[in-house]
Image: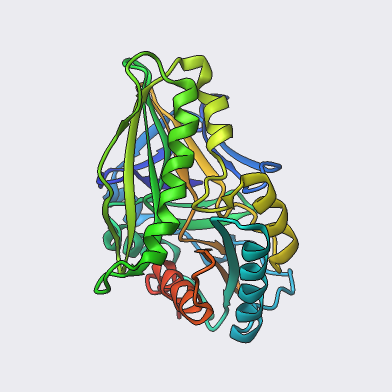
């Protein structure tokens, strides 16, 4: 089963599983795994959803024996990353970690998802369980949105993170610039004569934190869509620049595989094809919740502040869990 809500849309959706059509596809960060949900996308009545019984027993059991990184271990990893950045003159590299929460007996999946939906109305929100994997998340980074009628493609550069009350520093501004340049350079290769429209950089609020955001629009050919997405993913916001070098180092340095964290979700409707970056998410088990968090590291990064940033990001899912 899968349930989800689009950005700024309180309608609840699922799939009817009556056709072999792949309406929803989750792609892993490394591109090697995919989870698909067949059928047409249908609207679900919220009252009927509230009456459904979704038990903790349906979740897989955590037998991974993963041990979460301590703060000291993560700070050491951050020092290693900053050394790699300085040695190779990188604009940024994204480091992530897995936080494990297991201080509970039961998770109320339905109420946890309802909480997430209420807390993040401007996000794509989902929960799914296919028997082998169960995930939940809420995030607002759009990898791409393609209008099948007008052939207009929209995407965004979203990078830099601070608590809402703090002012932007050079570190966050410099972190976001290469993300915007990266996206614009790729789009330029695919656009028709109308060129690339670029917005001014503005604040994007997500719960207790904010990001710097720049929006892009361009008209492209439908046959170029999948190739464009493959070039954009993973974006510098979840990987780094240059992409291949950073991706290789991420897989060497990080303690755990990212799985579907920082991968992307493709959802196709009659009118649009939408792609979302799978951030602020957690893998759900009967006996544990694995929270995936990370941040963009630059030569100016302060390891202590980066740790605090990941702690803030983990709250996106953690504070909305209903457990007993």
Q: Identify the residue at image location x=61%, y=47%.
A: 242
Q: How far across and down, in percent of the image, does residue 2 sit?
A: 48, 46
Q: Could one spot residue 253 in this view of the protein? A: yes
Specify the farthest residue to the bottom: 72
- Relative placement, left or right, of 224 versus 192 is right
Image location (x, y in percent) of residue 92: 54, 58
In the rendering, at what x and y percent does residue 296 appear?
51, 62
Which residue is more in the foreground, 5 or 79?
Answer: 79
Q: Residue at x 53, y 32 (%)?
A: 229
- The quarter of the rendered structure image containing the C terminus is bottom left
Front position in the image: 82 or 319: 82
Q: Quadrant of residue 215?
A: top left
In the picture shown, does residue 262 fall above or below 119?
above
Q: Position of residue 157 (x, y in %)?
A: 39, 46
Q: Which residue sits at x=63%, y=84%?
A: 70
| Image-based side of 284 in relation to 217, left or right | right
Compared with 22, 131 (above or below) is below
Q: Is residue 257 above or below residue 228?
A: below
Place residue 257 in its image quadrant: bottom right
> In the rendered image, which quarter is residue 211 located in?
bottom left
39 versus 241 height, above or below = above
């Amino acid at each position: 089963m899968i349930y989800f809500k689009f950005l700024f849309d309180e309608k609840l959706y699922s799939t009817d599983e009556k056709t072999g059509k792949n309406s929803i596809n989750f792609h892993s960060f490394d591109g090697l795994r995919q989870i698909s949900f067949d059928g047409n996308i249908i609207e679900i009545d919220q009252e009927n959803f509230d009456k459904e019984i979704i038990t903790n027993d349906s979740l897989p059991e955590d037998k991974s024996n993963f041990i979460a990184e301590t703060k000291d271990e993560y700070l050491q990893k951050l020092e290693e990353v900053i050394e790699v950045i300085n040695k190779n003159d990188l604009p940024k590299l994204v480091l992530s970690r897995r936080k494990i929460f297991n201080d509970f007996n039961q998770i109320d999946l339905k109420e946890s998802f309802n909480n997430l939906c209420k807390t993040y109305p401007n996000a794509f929100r989902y929960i799914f369980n296919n028997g082998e994997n169960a995930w939940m998340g809420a995030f607002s980074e759009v990898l791409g949105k393609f209008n099948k009628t007008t052939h207009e493609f929209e995407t965004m550069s979203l990078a830099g993170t601070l608590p809402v009350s703090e002012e932007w520093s050079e570190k966050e501004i410099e972190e976001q610039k290469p993300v915007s340049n990266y996206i614009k350079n790729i789009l330029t290769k695919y656009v028709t004569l109308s060129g690339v429209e670029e917005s001014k950089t503005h604040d994007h609020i997500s719960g207790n934190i904010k990001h710097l955001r720049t929006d892009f629009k361009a008209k492209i050919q439908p046959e170029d869509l999948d190739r464009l997405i493959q070039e954009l993913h993973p974006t510098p916001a979840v990987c780094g620049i240059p992409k291949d070098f950073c991706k290789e180092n991420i897989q060497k340095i990080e303690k755990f595989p990212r799985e579907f964290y920082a991968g992307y979700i493709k959802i196709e409707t009659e009118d649009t094809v939408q792609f979302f970056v799978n951030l602020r998410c957690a893998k759900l088990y009967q006996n544990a919740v694995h929270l995936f968090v990370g941040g963009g590291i630059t030569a100016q990064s302060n390891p202590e502040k980066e740790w605090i940033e990941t702690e803030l990001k983990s709250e996106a899912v953690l504070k909305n869990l209903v457990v007993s």
